[in-house]
């Protein structure tokens, strides 16, 4: 494929993902029709189906883009001279910041499990934000051993529930303090 064809393909795919994201956030997955997405992207329905098997495949691409953005924000949050604890706390704050993007909580935490199924949405998370959490926990809790994986899953679920609560109006600082207490308690327990 020539460079210009490749660029056009990437540009069309990007336009479809952007249009899909806007409509999925504004109307929800079920209420968004493929003709609307194609029109919003400025392409034909044929072009949509050339790039994505169906609406669900486009939705998955949107979710993957959003999940990568969250993971990148978390990764960018810690300085190289941070202690593992400080890096993890900074990552928690970056996660909450990233989840503040309009519609992101709904897309990743509510619609993705409902539309893609829990295993698929968990796999996307495992490759993104959950991966950064696992890395941070491994550095902060080197004695976690076999409990690292369950701790990662439990804390990830807790962070997700906190993000939903924060979006609904709960006080973010109280969740950040609670997470700090929890992480410090885990570290103290594992040092014994």
Image: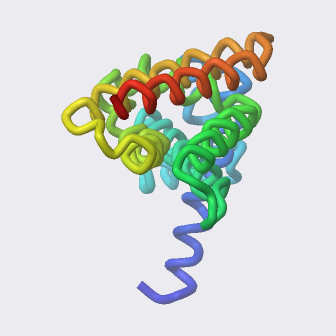
Query: Could you tell whether 22 is left or right of 54 in the image?
Result: right
Relative to the observer, which residue lies in front, 171 or 112? 171
Residue at 55% of width from left, 34% of height from top?
A: 34
Question: How many numbered marks are there?
Answer: 0
In this view, the residue farthest toward the front is 192
Residue at 58% of width from left, 56% of height from top?
A: 75
Location of residue 155 (image quadrant): top left
Residue 41, horizontal then vertical, whole percent: 68, 49
Relative to the observer, which residue lies in front, 43 or 88? 88
Residue 25 visible at all? yes
Relative to the observer, which residue lies in front, 52 or 170? 170
Q: Quadrant of the N terminus?
A: bottom left
Relative to the observer, which residue lies in front, 151 or 56? 151
Residue at 37% of width from left, 32% of height from top?
A: 152
Residue 187, horizontal then vertical, whole percent: 44, 32
Q: Identify whether 22 is placed above or below 3.
A: above
Query: Could you tell whether 151 is left or right of 44 in the image?
Result: left
Residue at 69% of width from left, 37% of height from top?
A: 93
Location of residue 37 (image quadrant): top right
Query: Could you tell whether 101 is left or right of 17 in the image?
Result: right
Residue 45 visible at all? no
In the rendered view, how is the structure colored? rainbow
Residue 50, horizontal then vertical, whole percent: 42, 55
Query: Could you tell whether 43 is left or right of 154 in the image?
Result: right
In this view, the residue farthest toward the bottom is 2
Q: Quadrant of the C terminus?
A: top left
Location of residue 39 (image quadrant): top right
In this view, the residue farthest toward the left is 146
């Amino acid at each position: 494929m020539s460079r210009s064809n490749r660029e056009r393909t990437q540009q069309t795919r990007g336009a479809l993902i952007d249009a899909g994201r806007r409509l999925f956030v504004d109307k929800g997955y079920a209420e968004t029709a493929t003709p609307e997405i194609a029109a919003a992207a400025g392409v034909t329905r044929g072009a949509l189906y050339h790039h994505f098997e169906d609406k669900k495949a486009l939705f998955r691409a949107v979710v993957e883009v959003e999940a990568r953005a969250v993971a990148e924000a978390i990764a960018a949050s810690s300085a190289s001279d941070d202690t593992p604890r400080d890096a993890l706390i900074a990552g928690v704050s970056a996660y909450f910041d990233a989840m503040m993007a309009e519609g992101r909580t709904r897309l990743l935490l509510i619609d993705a499990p409902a539309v893609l199924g829990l295993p698929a949405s968990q796999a996307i998370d495992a490759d993104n934000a959950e991966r950064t959490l696992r890395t941070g926990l491994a550095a902060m809790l080197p004695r976690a051993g076999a409990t690292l994986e369950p701790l990662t899953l439990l804390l990830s679920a807790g962070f997700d529930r906190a993000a939903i609560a924060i979006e609904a109006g709960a006080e973010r600082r109280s969740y950040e303090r609670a997470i700090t207490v929890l992480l410090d308690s885990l570290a103290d327990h594992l040092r014994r």
